[in-house]
Image (cartoon, rainbow, N blue to C red):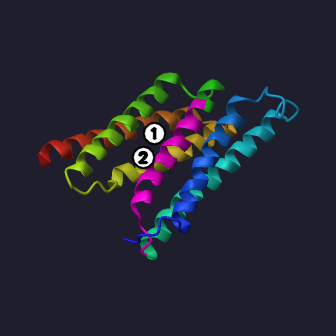
Amino acid sequence: MTKGALNLPNLLAFSRLLMAPLMLWLLAYRDSAPLSGIHASWLDYFSALVFVLASVTDFFDGYIARQCDQMTQLGKIIDPLADKMLTLAAFLGLMLLGRADAFAIYLILTREFFITGLRVAIAEEGKDVAASWTGKVKTVVQMVAIGFLTMNWPGGSALLWLAVAITLYSGYEYVRDYVRGQ
């Protein structure tokens, strides 16, 4: 593991930390002075662009860190934090716009917080907490749902509920595997 914390993967993850509040602002504060003159469809486009850019950094920071042996302790903290901040910003903004069901968002965020806490506990026990295949599918489906909802495309709500189902199932897998490993 590389010791230098200031590397490209960490800078990409840090950029995602900055894009998350920008996305929330674009979604939730459309009536604020700087945004009030911009048509809602353009705000959707800008929000989607920020989300896509942030999602691309998520892919590349992990890829570069593994391929170039630049994994750091800081990266192990910032990367999942940036992911959670981005999805939290997107889902809260979409909920405030009335595009995402509040109960669906509650279920997703509750699972995310619970599993993050469980992963910390597992890591403290010195065990590996790599993301499962289902966890990766969960992330992709959540991203697609956020994209559809941000653009206000048909099917966004159905994708959100599919994301809820996969999110809860992947959470169940984490708990099941943890209990079995005890």
For image coordinates 57% across by 28% down, the residue present is 100
Q: Secondary structure at mark 2?
A: helix
Of 176 and 31, nearer the camera is: 31
Q: Residue at x 55, y 41 (%)?
A: 145
Q: Which region of the structure is painted magenta?
A: 69-92
Q: Earlier in the sequence, mark 2 or mark 1?
A: 2
Q: Is residue 130 left or right of residue 150?
A: left
Identity of the amino acid at label 1?
Ala
Image position, residue 175 (x, y; %): 23, 40
Give the residue at mark 2.
138
User: Is the residue 138 above or below the residue 9 in the image?
Assistant: above
Measured along the vertical axis of the image, is residue 139 above or below residue 67?
above
How many C-alpha atoms fall within 10 Å of the one at disc 1: few (<14), some, or many (≥20)? many
Query: In which quadrant of the rendered image does the N terminus lie?
Result: bottom left
Mainly helix, strand or loop, the magenta region? helix
Question: Is 50 on the left or on the right of 159, as rendered?
Answer: right
